Amino acid sequence: MSGWRHSSIGSQIDRNTPLPFTFDGRPGSGFAGDTPASALLASGIRVLGRSFKYHRPRGLWGMGNEEPNAIFDVTEDGRTTPNVRSTTVMLRRNMALRSVNTAPDAARDRTGMLDLFNRFLPGGFYYKTFMAFGWMRWEPMIRRMAGLGRLDPGHCPPADIPQLNARCDLLVIGAGPAGLAAARAAARNGREVWLVDDAPEPGGSLRWRGGAIDGGDWREFTRDAIGAIIAAGGRILTGTTIWGAFDHGLFAAWERRDGSPDRLWRIRAAETVLATGAIERPLWFANNDLPGILSAEAALHYLSLYGAVAGRRILLATGNDASYPVAAALAQAGCDVTLADARADAPAAPDGVKHLGAARLTQAHGRNSVAGAVVDGRVIETDAILVSGGYTPSVHLHCQAGGKLDWDTGSDSLIPRPGSSALWVAGAVNGSFGLARALAEGHAAGGGTGPAPRAAAGDWQFFPMRPDPDLRGRQWIDPQNDVTLKDVKLAAQEGYRSVEHLKRYTTLGMATDQGRSANFAGLATMAALTGRTIPETGTTTYRPPFSPVPLGVIGGLRRGDLFNAPKRLPLEIAHKARGAMFREYGGWLRPSVYGTDDEAVLAQQEALAARKSVGLYDASPLGKIEVIGPGAAELLDYCGYLRLSTLKPGRARYGFVLGETGIVHDDGVVFRLAENRFVVSASSSHAATVRMILEEARQDVFDPTKSFIHDVTAGFATLTVTGPKSRDLLIAANLPEALYDDANLPHMSVTETFWNGHSLRVARVSFTGDRSYEVTVPARHAPALYSALETARQEVSGRWIGMEAVMILRAEKGFILVGKDTDGLTMPHDLGWEAPREKRKDEYLGRRSLFTAEARRADRRQLVGLEIDGDAPLPTGAHLVPLEGQRRSLGFVTSSYFSPILGRPIALALVEGGRNRIGTELGVFHLGKIGRVRICDSCAFDPTWERLHA
Amino acid sequence: MQIFTCPFCGPRDETEFHFAAEAGKKRPIPAETVTDDEWAEYLYMNSASRGKAQEVWLHVTCGEFFLMTRDTVTRDVTAVTSLPGRNA
């Protein structure tokens, strides 16, 4: 308990507005402007969580999305959001913070004893140990003990996050000194600049390091830059994380807004400046994960912005110049500061700071919190250790955009290789530290004319700090995933020497902080152990997202009904008024049955009514693809399995569309309305792809000017009248007289006429085996057609039937659904359609594939029917097996129903050499039991087809 | 997210497009004279070249099939043209 709040320092907080909160159930207090991390630091609470694997106490390390430890489940208004990084959100009144991976809480965790067994839990431990008795046995236990926050199943965030597209001339990522200079320079040249930063306000490190620019305070410079951006029509987004760089200059940004839903931006920039800065590395010594050990940069951040101070007796261990202003500020704030610099030629210490040169920190003392440190073998009493092992440039977006990295000795880091991505790079991300260099690079990257903004010169010198594999004690490399130096050594020993293998074997860098502060040490150690340089060892691949983004932000409004919105019928309201139950069929929302009784019972009643008198159903989703022009017949001949140029105008023909592999893609009826006008009635779920098959042939194989393809499915509504009394219903509906005459409109014919002043198309095609009429009108006239047919239906005692009844009716006749009664191997001759394959001499899609050795096999799976004893329909998908000999699958049941008109179950199946098996028996295997079925013709009802004309 | 240019509609987001085929593959005909191997080659063998590639793409929203020349590494699109159809 040694963090404290300074009485006057703190530019972000409003001391007049205290905010109460709780941490692990105990009350705490912060100020408006605090983050949970700064409030906890100031209140002196050190142990903020337990580590992932060993349950060691952990405390605050950093100040942004690199934070590995201070992660909480946050409850507000009864809703819990898990795994919130306490450094990146604002503290709000009555926030309840719950440490993760602790029982009962961070301070008194029961499973801390796990750490005693650490020597038995090396890297790769899970792979080696829990294979005995199978991983499945161990997994539930391990999952309970490991992991981070707990999901609140009651919290379903609303799908209210807008996703917006934007364009700009220049996107500047990062509003620190380099980003501000770039944005200002470009805006002054009249360019539309978007300046984006994930902090709540622009300034970057200037916010805590301060600085004079062009002789004035940095805030004046920032105001000037913002003014220039706004004046040139640009925009500043704060609290916004650019989390992904994608092809052709697209960036994804997550904007957090207080009091409004977050937003996702897709920003397409003509040019981009990357000014994302760098993240401080830790140091590696025994027990370097103790609470009270913080990043030096973060300590200055908390002091300057929030007045939150890490401790009173502070040891600052470093090897670079960046830490000197930190030591000075802490000393000024009243801390007792010892600066231990690894360099022999360290610069002079700031006033009031004790200074140790060529000093090496080897160990931290303390149980749950820092109590002392060992420097050069001497114990120093201290209550906080601040460390700086140098900086790692945040090159993620550069690498996501395809960029490569080069080693830069001056900054002791990997920096973007110039020109290897399309992004301009400026400032610390480029290994250019110090205010003057950052401003100069930013100014140049923004295309600045004239002199760059001036600041006091002063390059930072970096002494390379590395983990020492020979040092005694446990040194943490990745605190969030509990990876120690020993684990990295073990990986090297066991041959996992590639960084990608190291990552997967030890889980280094795989936690939610993505190893921001850990990866460099891991790869530097591996490089040292394997005698390679750091560039030779390489880095793991950078992929979006840069930091965790809520799924709700990526999903946006596409959830629930809007996730994959079905197509809707023009008559949906009318069907609903009739009590229809709706389901999705092939992407369309259609009535399944009418009424509120059991769906299966209603489907049986509807199917029987359609057979006995007349049924009416909405067939509007049937594809209606118009193929028009002098080349139409030739095009359709090529795209279809059956020739269509021989079809007479006014007639219809059933056929198939094949892929080039010969597999049935779709079936359906084609109408020839006139010499040069066809309508392809593709099945409702395949209409879109059939259109593209036709288009591809039209544009690639034929003269595209000779035909035209127009999918008008959505423009028309179709109601189908089917059953022995279907003609009576048409008569009762007062439809044009010409339709009643079978000589004029026989089965498989079509006619267009006028009715009530608009066009009406009637086709005699049947999906049920009964006399049927498909009546089609323009969609806007659907209600008129509906009411005419509805009045007539009552007169002839017909019934509205849903798709479930239609499925029964078509299966009774052996009519297939492509994709249900066929699979990815089914060719047309497997369905009994041999003739075109044998007789056609002209080229058509898929033709050659129908003559391969595979296509000629006699034991191909063929469509047949099944007869069953008893009343119970077969389970769809059950496999057919030989009754004797070795059991193997001969095929499977594709459709299965109880037929109300036949009073028995019926089924369709694909069976090896099925047609030759008609009359024989096979076994049907289901849930370990084998029943008996007889193979029969696929048409179970009205095999003489008399009812088509009845 | 890439931007492709449909010869009919202009530049659009890549989500509006489907890959159709590698360009330059001639469909072997007539079927009677085509061997199984030739047919399999036509159906399944692609060069999937690294770098410059010429492909047929479909702009799903308008139905235009077109030739696109692009670099599969840099993702640069260098040319788009309509299919010549039978007039080729």
Image (cartoon, coloured by chain):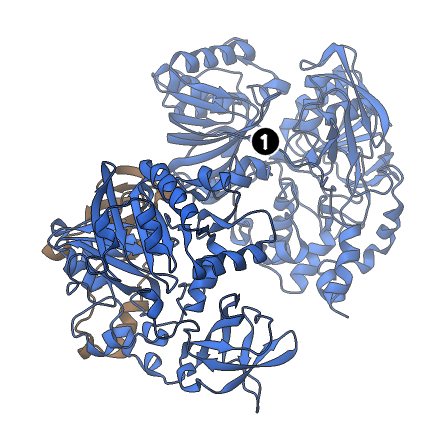
- Crowd band around label 1 with a 10 angstrom C-alpha radius: few (<14), some (14–19), many (20+): some
Q: Colour of chain B?
A: brown
Q: Quadrant of the N terminus of chain A?
A: top right
Q: Say whether residue A121 is left or right of residue A787.
A: right
Picture layout, residue A479 above or below residue A603: above
Q: Which of A877 and A336 is in front in this view?
A: A877
The colour with which the image depicts chain A is blue
- Determine the residue positioned at 61% across, 49% down: A524
User: Can you give x and y, in whole percent of width and height, for residue B44 in the image?
Assistant: 32, 68
Q: Is residue A840 above or below residue A204?
A: below
Outermost front residue: A795
Residue positioned 51% across, 82% down in the render: A934
Badge 1 amino acid: Gln
Q: Which residue is drawn at 34% across and 47% down?
A: A732
Name the quadrant containing residue A376: top right
Vertical position of residue A878 compared to residue A206: above or below: below
Q: Residue A578 versus residue A282: which sits nearer the camera? A: A578
Q: In which quarter of the image is the C terminus of chain A?
A: bottom left
Is residue A731 in sight in this rendering?
A: yes
What residue sits 34% from the left and 41% below the top? A785
Q: Tell me if residue A348 can be seen.
A: no
Residue A530 image-quadrant placement: bottom right
Q: Position of residue A39 (x, y in %)?
A: 76, 23
Circle 1 residue:
A461
